[in-house]
């Protein structure tokens, strides 16, 4: 994949220079893409919502509900590890789908610069609701990128209790040379203000606590980068220890709540009567799904140019400042 990208970029750069075109807006090769929109990719993180959010909704007390909500978030992290890139959503692009248990999924791209995706999920019988929006930010490194999803994530239950959480950051290396590596870093924070519950989970804690003496680091073994650790707090006091690895299992006080591959992930099914803006109807995505690389590339470039032209028009024809009276 790395060699394919570099070859394509060099070829496109040379072609644009020869034709006197801009060298800034070069379209990435569709050969590195999967035939899905990023809106579809977002649902990968919610693959176990029909299992664990339903468990949370049925929990007998607030603490168990809080723990099952944490399990829901952690259980979907490994689903986000994909080699190929999804298509960037076009402004106004949507995705409507359902899970087998009746959960309804709605997503829309509400901003292009910066890229912001809004979502709503409704559990069966309105037992829970997952809402929020994410802005995606990334900073490039010499051989990789570090980024994350910034924005509110909110789980609301039928009795009115609300759990809010933030996602950890993503690190990717090997984008130019070496193996392509993906791992979660930093922290995920959960809060339930009504029941005075909170949790903070640190990912790759050895890296996060790397400010140690040379002697200490020399005689200790670093934990795997998928390691995570944290605690559940009630009224500011620790009530449960959190341990595990997002590629294997999650434990609360040595009791296993989640194990990878214990259950198959739930796959969303596209709604039969979806909007014309449904991402699965995109010409470039459809062409790639059919294996027509050349058509997919040309359609992708056409849509990107159209979006840039639309953005320019919005900027030129946008609301004018009110005249002073």
Image (cartoon, rainbow, N blue to C red):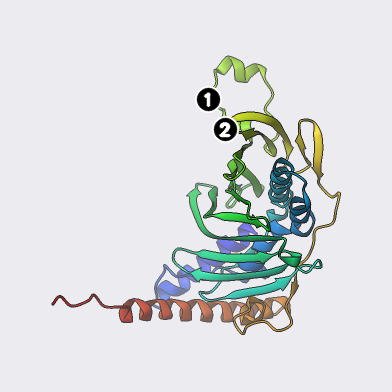
State the residue at coordinates (77%, 52%).
52
Disc on res. 224: none
Neighbour tally class for label 2: few under 14, some 14-19, many 20 plus, Cα within 10 Å: few
Where residue 262 appears, as percent x and y from the top left, is 86, 49
Q: Secondary structure at mark 1?
A: loop
- Residue situated in front as seen by the camera: 40 or 32: 40
Q: Secondary structure at mark 2?
A: helix
Where residue 182 appears, as percent x and y from the top left, is 65, 48
State the residue at coordinates (77%, 36%).
251
The residue wearing badge 1 is 211
Q: Is residue 113 left or right of residue 228?
A: left
Task: Note whether 236 is above or below 32 in the view shown.
Answer: above
Residue 32 shows up from this direction: no
Q: Is residue 64 left or right of residue 315?
A: right
Tell me which corner region of the image, top left, top right, bottom left or bottom right, holds residue 118.
bottom right
The residue wearing badge 2 is 208
Residue 92 shows up from this direction: yes
Q: Quadrant of the N terminus?
A: bottom right
Neighbour tally class for label 1: few under 14, some 14-19, many 20 plus, Cα within 10 Å: few
Please identify the residue farthest to the right as the structure is shown. 262
Q: CA distance from mark 1 to mark 2?
A: 8 Å
- Residue situated in front as seen by the camera: 270 or 122: 122
Please identify the residue farthest to the front as the structure is shown. 159
């Amino acid at each position: 994949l790395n060699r394919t990208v570099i070859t394509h970029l060099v070829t496109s750069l040379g072609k644009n220079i020869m034709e006197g075109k801009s060298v800034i807006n070069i379209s990435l090769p569709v050969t590195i893409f999967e035939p899905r929109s990023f809106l579809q990719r977002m649902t990968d993180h919610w693959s176990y919502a029909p299992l664990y959010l339903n468990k949370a909704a049925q929990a007998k007390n607030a603490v168990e509900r809080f723990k099952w909500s944490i399990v829901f978030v952690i259980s979907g992290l490994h689903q986000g590890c994909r080699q190929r890139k999804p298509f960037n959503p076009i402004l106004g692009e949507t995705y409507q789908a359902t899970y087998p248990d009746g959960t309804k999924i709605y997503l829309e791209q509400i901003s292009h610069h910066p890229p912001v995706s809004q979502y709503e999920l409704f559990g069966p019988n309105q037992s829970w609701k997952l809402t929020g929006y994410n802005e995606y930010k990334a900073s490039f490194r010499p051989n990789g990128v570090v980024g994350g999803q910034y924005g509110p994530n909110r789980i609301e239950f039928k009795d009115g209790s609300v759990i809010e959480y933030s996602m950890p950051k993503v690190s990717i290396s090997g984008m130019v040379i070496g193996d392509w590596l993906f791992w979660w870093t930093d922290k995920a924070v959960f809060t339930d203000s009504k029941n005075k519950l909170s949790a903070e989970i640190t990912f790759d804690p050895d890296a996060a606590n790397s400010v140690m003496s040379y002697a200490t680091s020399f005689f200790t073994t670093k934990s795997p980068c998928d390691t995570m650790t944290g605690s559940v707090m009630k009224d500011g006091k620790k009530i449960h220890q959190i341990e595990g690895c997002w590629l294997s299992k999650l434990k609360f006080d040595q009791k296993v709540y989640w194990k990878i591959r214990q259950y198959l992930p739930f796959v969303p099914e596209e709604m039969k009567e979806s909007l014309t803006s449904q991402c699965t109807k995109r010409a470039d995505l459809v062409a790639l799904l059919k294996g027509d690389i050349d058509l997919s590339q040309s359609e992708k470039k056409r849509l990107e140019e159209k979006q840039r032209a639309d953005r320019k028009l919005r900027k030129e024809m946008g609301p004018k400042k009110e005249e002073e009276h």
